[in-house]
Image: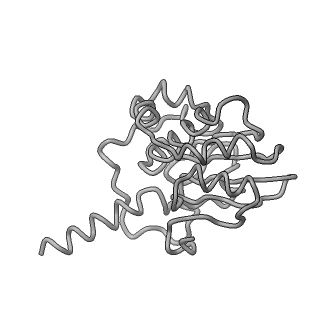
Amino acid sequence: MRKPAALLTLALSHAACGGGASAGAPSPMPTPKAPTAPAQGADDLGPLEPSAIEARHESWRKAREEAAPDAEAARALRSVPPGAEVVVFLGVWCPDSRHDVPRLWKAFDQAGGPLPFSVTYVGVGRDKREPGGTAEAAGLRYVPTVVVRRGGREVGRIVESAPGGIERALADLLSGARSGVISGRADLGGR
């Protein structure tokens, strides 16, 4: 009988950063809160700055320190064509966000100098919404989600996880080497 319980625990933890009101039908049971997840407050919704997240949530600062992004991909971020807009949707309560977003911050640090694209961070609640409605307009279903736009048009997005690392996937979208949805989720094509 241990095997079904273990499978249920695994399934619930995998779905921890997905679902919510904008994902379609309501979940049959509430998603359990990860024991190490920081509490979400009103200050964690809407436009955010990395320094403010790290000041409120020690686990995010520690995640940035411990992150090990691909150095080649980090350098590639410095040389992508200029002018793109990157919007990073995250949940401070979400373990996937806490893993990948600080990794991205560290990759930006490693890239060095000013980046040739703008980056905006938007914090969302478990329902994948925030006061400005930006997440809802983007059709947000999972966090983290990184949306890349050029000339006001979306050219691609990274949803929840990226095979090969979030910094590599972002460099590919920004350089034009890839487009569309990049995700490790099987229900999104898993490419």
Left or right? Give the position of 141 relative to 136.
left
Q: Position of residue 171 (x, y in %)?
A: 67, 51
> Which of these two is toward me, 139 or 86?
86
Q: Is residue 64 above or below residue 130?
A: above
Q: Position of residue 27 (x, y in %)?
A: 43, 68
Farthest residue, direction left: 1
Left or right? Give the position of 157 relative to 152.
left
Residue 51 lies in quadrant = top right
The image quadrant where one finds the C terminus is: bottom right
Q: Is residue 57 above or below residue 175?
A: above
Left or right? Give the position of 38 relative to 142.
left
Farthest residue, direction right: 151
Farthest residue, direction front: 72
Q: Is residue 137 above or below residue 47?
A: below
Q: Position of residue 180 (x, y in %)?
A: 70, 67
Residue drawn at x 87%, y 52% is 151
Left or right? Give the position of 14 relative to 81.
left
Residue drawn at x 52%, y 74% is 187
The image quadrant where one finds the N terminus is: bottom left
Residue drawn at x 56%, y 52% is 166
Q: Position of residue 45 (x, y in %)?
A: 58, 39
